[in-house]
Every structure is written in structure tokens, then in C-alpha cells.
Amino acid sequence: MTSAALAGRAGETVDEVAAQIDAGHFKEANAGIDGALAQSGLAPETRTALEFQRERMRRIRLDFPITEPEAKARLRELIPDMTDAEFDGWKASNQLEHMVIDGVPYYFSRSVSNLFRVSPQATARRATPATRNDGPMESANAYHDEALAQARATGKSSVAPRRVRVTQSIIVNADAVPAGKAVRAWIPFPRAIPGQQEDIALISSAPAKHETAPESTLQRTVYMEQPAVAKTPTKFSVTYELTIFGQVHQIDPSKVVPAGNSAELAPYLGERPPHIVFSDDIRAFSKQVVGDEKNPYRIAQKLYQAVDRIPWGGAREYSTISNISHYALHAGHADCGQQTLLLMTLLRLNGIPARWQSGMVYSDGKYDNLHDWGFMYLAPYGWVPVDVTTGQFAGAKDPGVEWFYFGGLDAYRIAFNDDYGTQLVPRKQHFRSETVDSQRGEVEWQGGNLYFDQWDYTFEAHVLPSATAGG
């Protein structure tokens, strides 16, 4: 068999194993991996891909730890008179997210809380109302009025800035790494983007010795390392300041024209497997939503509304999902990155260039969360932001407020990433914990990657009083 044929067969094996895992056939997948790894002459990249599929199964089991009796017991704490028929209905519709692994159903760690986000029936049956910890920018507020007023008065698109001081840390569990061995950590760090985030200053790091990735790095980080100490957590941190601008792009839909397929825009128009694929399901959904609309602005607006209607739900780790946009379309719920990748896929399918951005959202020391959003290219206006998860403020009297995040952003977010699934600098030697995004950070040692169950992170942002006005 030729080397090309061997490579093709190896690729098919990886695909087969991935499909077996997605179907919950873990025993078959493990047997397939063992058989493939025993072959001589296996290419290093194929070996790594197969080893990651085994790691993916381990991560899935961490995400789906709840047995069916445990899921029923947790639900009955909230719905004391829940019937088995109700449970079976939520299970059958996958509103109670689960995965059948080798014939046994296991439930997602956030399946019970997500149920009350996606099922009005379950919410109505709950004995006590759920508490929500939504961010301050998830409803219309004074900041949106401030940014719109400045944009309308000045004609500027970068408005209502905030000067922010941030401290972000990684704390590795005690004895996760043998004493004396070097722990390597990457903490996300913003890159300068004119008109969006500027005047970035690294104030300090612990340990003091660090390596800041170049501005050109699309998933930028500060890299540090230090030896582990027995029975002691290993902590890394960075403190920095930056100025963040809100974004308001005043767009006349009648002036928007097709973007075309220039060399500059081509990378943002095509498929990008595994997470941006123009599948039959994606095409059918797009046709249903877009209909006969030809104006790119109106097409994007329809797609934005359609994806915004998908209920938000706590997400599985992205590294466990084979195709995130497909998952977002079919799971019945999606978080910010899943919604963003689905919208990007739909926009690209319709000839509208789309790209990724993500980082952290915050309030002044009271709230923080990982968040993903995107940008779309609307000619002749150029690249404009789009945050489909924050979505449309339906019912707002001012259309600028109602559609604020369709072409705008607030200043209460820090972008760490201008692409997804790219390499860190310096490059990791072992698997990434997060294969798509970079918001919490990454950690490893010579013995392998340290996954999220072996460390935690903190993030704290405070608005400095000197830059809360003007533009």
C-alpha cells in the first residue's frame, strides 16, 4: 500500500473512532484505538489524533458523571412530585441532556439546571424559582444609551471608553505535579486593536519572569513557569491595564451590498472543518430562515434573530464536541461560543464574511464570565461586531438599543482571541485543555497536560475612574 493510501486509511480510522465516540460506543472506540496504535509505521500526527480521541472519552465522562437514578433524585429535589413519565419525556427530547455510553445513560453535569432554561413545562413545575446570575450587559441599561448618544453626536464608531485594571490567576492543585518539576502556564492577555482596546500595560506578573506573546498572536497569552512545591498549590498571575472602547456602527441597510470574494475576505467565507461545515442540515436551516432575501444586512439580521432564539444553556467542554455548529443547531440549547460558531457558519454560507472574537465580560469587580462573539463584514462599512448571545433587546423603544449588539459592542469585555483553535506562543507540548478558545488559560508539565479538574482560575476587573467618560 502506498504512503498516500496508508495516510488515507489512518485518517479514516480516526474518523471512525470519533464517530464511535459520538455514538457512545466507547468500548469499540478504545479497541479501534488500541488496534491502530499497534500498527507499525503510524504517522506521528495520526498517533496524536488517536491518543486525543482516547483523551476525549475521558473528558466526556467528566462532563457526563450523573447516573439516571442520580438525575431523578436531583430533579425531585426541585420538583417533588415529578413523575417518571415527565422525566422520560424530558429525556426523550434531550431537554435533559444525556449521553448513552456503552448502553448506559449518563447525564451532563449541568443537565438539571439547563432543563429549567429550555423547558417551560419544567420551569412551571419547579417548587422554588430558579436564581439567575446574568451579567449586567444582558439587558438594556445606561451604558447603551451613553454609547449611542456619543456615536450619534460625534459620528464615531469607537465610543464610551473604560480604563480597566485586571488581575487574572491560575491556581494549580497541590501535588498535581511532582515536587520540583516545572509547571508551565499560559494566562490569556489582550492584544492591541485600534479603536477597540488600546494602551495595554502589563503591570506585574508572578512569577516575575514571563514571556508575553507577540501582538500578532491571535490567541495571545503571558507564559510563565515555576517548580511545584509539595503539598502547596502553584499559583501564577498577571496584572495589567487597558482602555476599552464601546463600538457603535450606524448602518443604513439600503446601502449594504454583497461583499464579494476578495483575497482578503476569502479566508472568512469558506468552510473550516470541523466546526464550520456547510452540511445539509445547515443549508436547510439557512434556507428556511433566509427565504428569498437578497440584501446582506437583512440576511444577517434574520440569521441573528434565528440563532438568538436558541435558548442559552451551560455548555459541555468544547474539546469534547466534534462539530460545534452542528451541536448548536441540534442540541436544543447553546452557549455563546456555540451560538457564535453557528452564526458564523450561516453567515459564511450566505456570502457574508464572518470571524471569531472572544475573551471575558465583567462589571466593576462584581461579575465576570467567559464570553464569545464575532464580527461580520458588511460592505461598504467593513467589519462590524455581532454578539448573538447577548442578542436583541426586544421591546426597547430606541431601535439603536434594540439592535445594539447587531453591529455594536459594550466596553465591558476584554478580547483575548481574534481567532479560534490557533497555536499558543510558546507552543504547548501536550494537548490543549481547551482546543477552541483561550480564556481560562492552559497548564502543563513534562508529564502531560493539566486538565481543568486539576486547576482553577480567578479573574477580577476594576474600572479606573479616570476614563469612564469622553470619546
Image: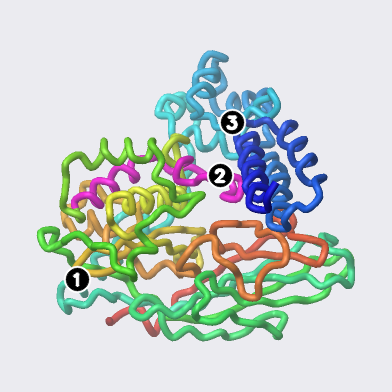
Q: Residue at x 37, y 61 (%)?
A: 268
Q: At which x and y percent is residue 148?
A: 22, 68
Measured as percent of width and height from the top left, residue 382 is found at: 25, 69
Residue 165 versus residue 300: which sits nearer the camera?
A: 300
Residue 160 image offset from top left, x and y in percent: 30, 75
| Distance Cα–Cα, label 2 vs label 3 | 16 Å
**Label 2: few (<14), some (14–19) or many (≥20) C-alpha neighbours in 10 Å:** some
Image depth: mark 2 or mark 3 in front? 2
Tag 1: residue type? Ala
The question of residue 318 being in magenta is answered with yes
Q: Which residue is mark 2?
A: 322
Residue 140 in the image, given as x and y percentages of width and height: 29, 56
Q: Which residue is mark 1?
A: 149
Residue in view at x 60 percent, y 50 percent: 319
Q: Amino acid at mark 3?
A: His
Q: Which residue in the structure is indicated by mark 3?
A: 98
Type of the residue with mark 2: Ser
The secondary structure that dominates the magenta segment is helix
Query: What stretch of residues is rendered in magenta?
Result: 298-327
Distance of label 1 from label 3 (alpha carbons): 47 Å
Total numbered labels: 3
Which element type, helix, strand or loop, lies under badge 2?
loop
Above or below, 121 against 194 in this view is: above
Q: Mark 2 or mark 1, which has the lower sequence index?
A: 1
Image-based side of 430 in relation to 356, left or right: right
Find numbered disc 1 in the image and state the secondary structure of the residue it sits on.
Answer: helix
Is 136 within the magenta? no
* Closer to us: 139 or 443: 443
- Residue closest to the far front: 1
Q: Which mark is residue 445?
A: none
